[in-house]
Amino acid sequence: MNETPPPLPSTPRILVVHEAAPTLRLIRENLSHFTNAAVDTTPDAVSGYEQALQRRYQLFIFNLKQPVLTGPLLYDLICKAYPHCHAGSRIAPGVVYITDPEAGLNVTNLTIDVRVKAVLVKPLTIERLLQSVDSVVTRRDPLTPPIK
């Protein structure tokens, strides 16, 4: 059985899961304007899990402290199921975590994992957000029309 994996889409797809609507909008708007990425957003971790298994993504952006599932737990669940749902994918895409400075979480343990591309601390800056996704997407001038 020589199964060839389906080709990756020409436009990278990113899934963002964060319970705060303003943060979702900020990330979606900036990535849509400054990169060639298609961005899917959801405030619900369970919905994010379902979306990750339905579509092929090149990167995930998760809030560390979700109400139902924490970011790392959500990512671990996706990592277990992703290769089984997407033919040709041996591993799940990388992840960027977002956290609040007041959360007091020790993020050094997270950054040891090579799948973690970055841990962003609020308030988010456009430049830091774009740096965290540089390995997956191509930046573009926001005055030029997006690539379809």
Image: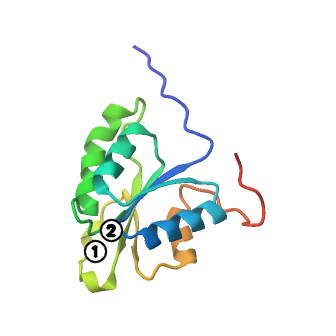
- Viewer-nearest residue: 131 or 28: 28
Which residue is identified by label 2? Answer: 111
Instruction: Name the residue located 40 percent from the left edge and 36 percent from the top edge.
Output: 89
Instruction: Name the residue located 58 percent from the left edge and 56 percent from the top edge.
Output: 137
Q: Is residue 91 visible?
A: no
The tally of labels here is: 2
Q: Position of residue 74 (x, y in %)?
A: 27, 54
Which residue is identified by label 1? Answer: 108
The residue under label 2 is which amino acid type?
A: Thr
- Tell me which corner region of the image, top left, top right, bottom left or bottom right, holds residue 16: bottom left
Q: Marks 2 and 1: in contact by CB < 8 Å?
A: yes
Q: Tell me the distance, in whole angstroms, between the alpha carbons under discs 1 and 2.
A: 5 Å
Identity of the residue furthest to the front in this view: 21
Q: Secondary structure at mark 1?
A: helix
Instruction: Name the residue located 44 percent from the left edge and 16 percent from the top edge.
Output: 2
Instruction: Bin the neighbour count of mark 1 within 10 Å (Cα to Cα): few under 14, some 14-19, many 20 and up.
Output: few
* Whether residue 82 is situated above or below residue 20 in the rendered picture: above
